[in-house]
Image (cartoon, coloured by chain):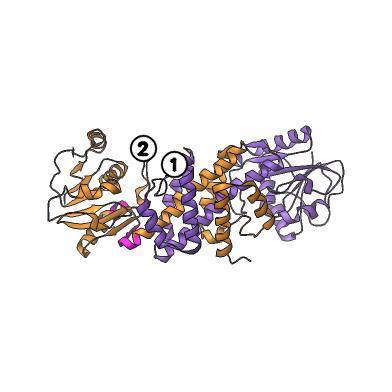
Chain colours: A orange, B purple
Amino acid sequence: MQTVIIGSGNVAYHLAKALKQNGISVAQIFGRNENDLQKISTELHIPYSSERLTDADLYIICVSDHSVEEVSRMITKKNCLVAHTSGSLPKEILSGAYRKSSFYPLQTFSKSKILNYKKIPFFIETENPEDQQLLTAIASKISDKVMESSYEKRKYIHLTAVFACNFTNHLFSRAKEISDSQEIPFDYFLPLIDETVQKIHEMEPKSAQTGPAVRNDKRILELHEELLSDESLSIYKTMNLSIKKMYHLP
Amino acid sequence: MQTVIIGSGNVAYHLAKALKQNGISVAQIFGRNENDLQKISTELHIPYSSERLTDADLYIICVSDHSVEEVSRMITKKNCLVAHTSGSLPKEILSGAYRKSSFYPLQTFSKSKILNYKKIPFFIETENPEDQQLLTAIASKISDKVMESSYEKRKYIHLTAVFACNFTNHLFSRAKEISDSQEIPFDYFLPLIDETVQKIHEMEPKSAQTGPAVRNDKRILELHEELLSDESLSIYKTMNLSIKKMYHLP
């Protein structure tokens, strides 16, 4: 089976690497950025082109969301399977006469980072059971966590990640604003943050909740509100109210 | 110098252990819970009592916030130094004729866990420079991160921790609600969460921000709002607005 990866960014690089490492040959890596393609090609020993897309059975599109549709039009072959790797697009965004699918790895990729691919979940959606089986077999060589997933489900996966990662990171930014204001090094808080995350590897986050809100410690809650303003105050109130509701506090 | 630890909970246990490991002898561990005291005493080879507080130069009170004042009254000696370990109480809560101080380790302690004490920040406040020097010397044997800190500053330390840890954990709870609703195992998100936290060990959280809000991707933001309700929707809107303000998005 011939597989081609389209794109030369972080997802393309890591997916190509993960495939190669697990004995799945990649016939070509195709994209616009000659420079990036060349680097990946040299490191992973995969032929590349920025001009002619080679013939293949499977094309995996690893480009940013807003380019997926345009790029998918370049595949004029009919009897083949095309997958995009976006968490927030339906497979129908792919524009061609081929079979359409989604092959979504749930991870933030940065090129320089060495990742443990075994732990990266893959969510797969196809038009028919044979393609589902094919993509599941490929993903299962890379990862231990492979799951079928409709577009509807993918929306919720993305939303979960927004809460657990994007918003979490923003809390770190707001926390750092507070510690910076008092000239307390933010890296003093890293062991505590690491511990917070380590805990949810071992227990339910709901059972791991600590802090003044879940203790319903009104003295501290009022004291903290006096120290805050603007967006940080809004976050403080919203989070406390949400904690109050979740634990049915008076 | 004679040191006594008052309390038999997680902070008392870990502090006693950290002191002993670093060559500081503990003369007694004192508390109410005979059973817990005995366990700590056996493991760490420290005498214990639930009846008579032994004579010492330094008493470190490791009990919950609401008991600190009451417990501090049991120390009737005058020429000694007493420290509490609370992040949210002034040293003046200590009720006696002795010298008062705060000795605050910034970490969540659970008894079973082996912690790297070197990384745990200690914040210290005393009445005079000699006591500051004494407690700093003790903390510096345990940890690499020791800092003077007024009550005012401690309030902000606690507040930073609430944002970076308590609220972060609550986001995990809300995220898990979303993934549970779709029967997606929450542990699929752990590698992504680990990666999010690993990143802020290497870069500023503000520079590490990803997601639809910072990309100002209105299509996704609207789509997500339709999937949410109640507290999770409030959190979604509040966090996005805060991200919008922080990055001056239109």
User: Does residue A148 appear in this view?
Assistant: no
Residue at 49 percent across and 51 percent down: it is B239
Q: Is residue A93 left or right of residue B77?
A: left
Numbered tag placed on residue A167 in the rendering: none
Residue at 28 percent across and 51 percent down: it is A85
Q: In the structure shown, which secondary structural element does the residue marked by tag 2 occupy?
A: loop
Quadrant of the rendering where the C terminus of chain B is positioned: top left
Q: How many marks?
A: 2
Indicate the amino acid at tag 2.
Ser
Residue at 59 percent across and 67 percent down: it is A248
Q: Is residue A85 magenta?
A: no
Indicate the amino acid at tag 1.
Ala
Residue at 15 percent across and 43 percent down: it is A53
Vertical placement of B4 versus A78: above or below? above
Residue A220, percent from left and from top: 67, 53
Q: Is residue A150 magenta?
A: yes
User: Does residue B242 appear in this view?
Assistant: yes
In this rendering, which labeled residue sits more in front, label 2 or label 1?
A: 1
Q: Which residue is mark 1?
A: B208
Of B193 and A72, the residue lying toward us: A72
